[in-house]
Amino acid sequence: MEAPERAPASVSEQKINQYRKRRYQALHSENEAANKRRARGLSSARERIEMLLDESTFVELDLFATHRAYGFGMEERKIAGDGMVAGFGEIDRRPVAVYAYDATAFGGSLGEVTAEKVVKVQELALRNRVPIIGINDSGGARIQEGVVALAGYADIFYRNVQSSGVIPQISVIAGPCTGGAVYSPAITDFIFIVAGQGYMFITGPEVIRVVTGERINFEDLGGGDVHNVTSGVAHFLPKTEEACAAGVRRLLSYLPSSNGERPPYLPTTDDPERADRELQTIVPEAPNKPYDMRELVGRVLDNREFFEVQPFFAPNIVVGFGRLGGHVVGIVGNQPKVLAGAIDINASVKAARFIRFCDAFGIPIVSFVDVPGYLPGRDQEHGGIIRHGAKLLYAYAEATVPKLTVITRKDYGGAYCVMSPKQMGADLNLAWPTAEIAVMGPEAAVNIVYKRELASAPDPAGRRKQLVAEYTARFANPYVAAERGYVDDVIEPSATRRALIRGLELGQRKTIERPHRKHGNIPL
């Protein structure tokens, strides 16, 4: 029996089949290149997006877009998507915009159409007030497209700046990024570099060798360790792409979708009244003995969960996110384990930028203070500690979000003025009984004030000991500041969580008006 003759396809069916064919061709050519990358342990652009987003939520834009360039054989090299996968989806059921450079197409270089795709999702994110995540793996501007590619970068940078402080912007460095490809991430709020895989530099090793004669490899020039430890360009150093995606998702769990929303509240089963007895003895009796500020912070936060930001850069100051009574807070704390917690250039810049991010997105700031002052030395002075240190001062004074401060031990000299005192607009200032608030430490103060007396004393050591005890009793304690109203209360360390949560609950109602101005002029 002969098969029945099939009816001719309708016009609609023909068009649908044409679409399916073109989509298959686009994705099939991409898969062939992706298979080669998988053999080297690398994910494709689309796989990176799927790894990041909730399952089956990605909506792709401009899949069929191709470049318009001519010359250099570009007419015959038409690749669907033009080396960019872009669109929107969801993370923990919250909408986000996302784009990823495809290194299998023109080396992930940026051309006119590539830039248009990025700009489209940037504007989509800004209009709809949702976070945007860029996954970067790019060789920079596409040489074959000349100044058009450079103009595309400028278009992207402009949108980065327009979105700054309005929506969270997160960058992932999943492969080599050079030239203009590094400046858009540098403008965004947070940068993740996949260890051993992501690189950032303006000029590559070969150009450096030709121009300066210096020989250096990718990793030593702009690898993850360099930018997380030395330069401070990056914030996180995940070991794998999977860990990177998990890190981005966790970071977003603390951030609002835009500056018009409150940070996401998460009900907690951790008792707001919980007292931690370990805090009673966490500060050593010896004033110069270190302890880990991160452990202290963790014991105060909900479920002891602290998400540290930039853990490898300027470790003498600790910043990160946590929750108190379900509310998101930004943490800033001096770290006695490193440089005794002294503030240097890098610490100033790190903390100032974090504080300004929190202020832009309505995240209250909780500061834990144990600081002997600014780090002394010629290198610091010549490096501009005055200018850079002023950034931290400016950031605290400028912030209008609720600001709560806990002085755990030392709070000396100019650092007192910087680390969120009452005079800088802090809303609640608490001190532990171990707090020492003074112009300088007792030993140093006695050596200066009583220099002549000690020089002529029959028993200099005994007299110094006596004077130090007198100075400590008179100045190096929290009660003098409390009597002046500079400290709202001296509390038991174990009661810190309860006191902060109560202060934070009231602070949620905070409103403040500033003088009209276009913007201030932070000492950059």
Image (cartoon, helix red, strand yellow):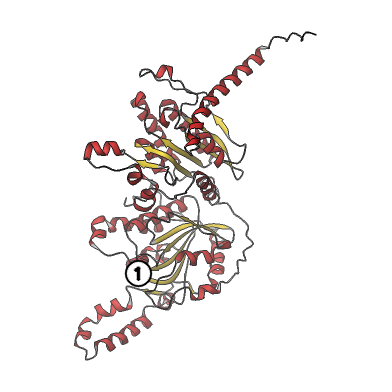
Q: Is residue 382 left or right of residue 510?
A: left
Residue 80 visible in the displayed image: yes
Location of the N terminus by quadrant is top right
Of 142 and 301, which appears nearest the observer? 142
Dot 1 falls on a residue whose secondary structure is loop
Q: Position of residue 202 (x, y in %)?
A: 32, 39
Of 426 and 116, which appears nearest the observer? 116
Check disc 1: other Cα within 10 Å, few if <14, some if 14-19, many if 20+: many
Three-letter amino acid code of the residue under disc 1: Pro
Q: Residue furthest right?
A: 1
Position above or below: 63 against 125:
above
Residue 427 visible in the displayed image: no
Name the image quarter holding residue 376. Answer: bottom left
Total marks in image: 1
Of 415 and 248, which appears nearest the observer? 248
Q: Residue at x 43, y 50 (%)?
A: 235
| Residue annotated with mark 1 | 372
Name the image quarter holding residue 302. Answer: bottom right
Q: Is residue 309 left or right of residue 338?
A: right
Q: Position of residue 329 (x, y in %)?
A: 51, 58
Q: Position of residue 437 (x, y in %)?
A: 38, 73
Of 93 and 313, which appears nearest the observer? 313
Q: Position of residue 164 (x, y in %)?
A: 44, 43
